Amino acid sequence: MNNSKNSILLVDPEFDPNTAADCNLLLKITADSFSYAVIDKNSRQLKAVFDQQECDDTAAELASALKKDSYLQLPFREIKVSVYTPNTIAVPNGIFNGSELESYANFFADATSTQVNTSLFAQFGFTSVFKLEQFTEETLNTSLASAARYEHHAPLLALASDAEGTALLLDFTAGSFNALLLQNHKVIFQNSFQIDTPDEFNYYLLLLIQELKLAPACSTVLLSGIIHQDDSYYNCLCKYFDNIRFNLPPAVDIDHAILDDMPAHYYSSLLALDLCV
């Protein structure tokens, strides 16, 4: 285990980089962090996890990591990347037209890149249409050109596949949270919020409760990412909700032994990226 002030690297001591052709690389990019995981699909083992929090310029720090991190330069079997972007819309599959992607880009306030991307969420009945920021797009095209790209809600949606009733999923970084509300397997709301203090989190939480007309006693809150039981954010949630649980990594046959000394929910959404198709 290697640690710096804002980052952590966990590596299986038996990981042989020469087996990269058997491995999937999962890369999750948020507005203020990025993390990656390496999963050996033959041995069904999690081989490496890296997490960089509190990025002042996520795109620039990611570009640097892609040049310097030897693990990110390996010839992986498959690469999946989820990327935060404000330029994303959800189009119901009943009216989605794949031949008119550029027309959807008219809904984006700041679409500086050229490539229009899509992610199909058949289970939830819609397709995400999104554009990345230009520097991020160019960085991925240079270093990870073969990567399958997903917008930033995709890992949380993959994690939500078994959620029942009314479920509010909250995925935290050190300075933000991603919110997803489901009612009977239908997506009601999804958005990301930057937060610096518990008071800011409390404000956004009350706003969600009011605007989405949440009945706290009837809602399940599922937590993942950088949040701890009894920390200030968790205690804030406890003021309004009765049923709060941590969202554990996907129930797939993968050995997560390298995470044994970490809270299991830290990297649930990162690992759920492997379920995205």
Image: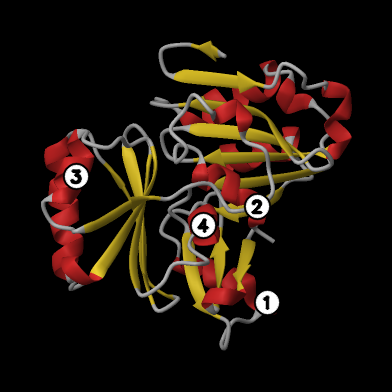
Quadrant containing the N terminus in the rendered view: top right
Report, in whole angstroms, how far the alpha carbon at label 3 lies from the one at label 1.
38 Å
- Residue at left offset 67%, top offset 38%: 255
Q: Can residue 132 be seen in this snapshot?
A: yes
Secondary structure state at the residue bearing disc 4: helix
Q: Earlier in the sequence, mark 1 or mark 2?
A: 1
Look at mark 2 in the image and give the residue it sits on. 252
- Residue type (three-letter) at the residue carrying disc 3: Phe
Residue wearing tag 4: 159
Marks 2 and 3, the one that precedes in the sequence: 3
Please state which of the two labelled residues, at mark 1 or mark 2, is closer to the viewer. 2
- Left or right: where does residue 69 sit relative to residue 154? right
Q: CA distance from mark 4 to mark 1?
A: 26 Å
Colouring scheme, one of rainbow, by chain, secondary structure, one colour: secondary structure
* In the foreground, 151 or 114: 151
Residue at the spot 84% in from the left edge and 41% down from the top edge: 42
Percent x, y for residue 162?
50, 67
The Cα–Cα distance between marks 2 and 3, rounded to whole angstroms, is 32 Å
Q: Residue 201 got which mark?
A: 3
> Which label number is shown at residue 161?
none
Image-quadrant location for residue 213: bottom left
Q: Earlier in the sequence, mark 3 or mark 4?
A: 4
